[in-house]
Amino acid sequence: MIERLKADDLILKVGGRYRLTALIQKRWLELLQGSRPLIEPGNMTPIELIVEEIRQGKLTIDFEASHLDPPSKLQ
């Protein structure tokens, strides 16, 4: 599981390790507060579920609303 978090494609998708960590933390809090998963959880742990939501593009950062540069502008 930790290897998936180190994958460059996931890090580049959100624009860096810091943003990935922040996105995971925010989503984990939402799940703890009762939000429903965006995918079928099966036997996944919460962190596996969140990483898969990001991989599938169901969980993203709203760059415009957050006033952050999208990953394409960071390179």
Image: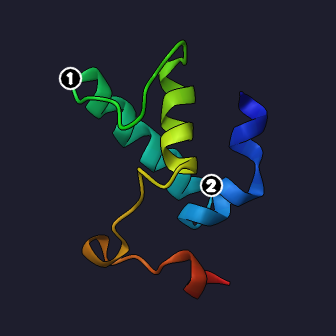
Q: Name the residue carrying label 1.
A: 34
Contact between labelled residues 2 and 1, with CB atoms less than 8 Å apart: no
Q: Is residue 65 left or right of residue 60?
A: left
Where residue 39 sits in the image (x, y, percent)? 42, 34
Q: Name the residue carrying label 2.
A: 17
User: What SS does tag 1 mark?
Assistant: loop
Q: How many marks?
A: 2
Point out the residue furthest to the left here: 34
Closer to us: 40 or 32: 40
Q: Residue at image x 48%, y 55%?
A: 57
Dot 2 amino acid type: Arg
Q: Residue at image x 29%, y 21%?
A: 32
Number of the front mark, 1 or 2:
1
Q: Residue at image x 65%, y 57%?
A: 11
Dot 1 amino acid type: Gly
Height in image: 25 above or below 48?
below
Where residue 71 sits in the image (x, y, percent)? 56, 76
Q: Residues within 10 Å of mark 2 (few under 14, many from 20)?
A: some
Q: Is residue 35 left or right of residue 15?
A: left
User: What SS does tag 2 mark?
Assistant: helix
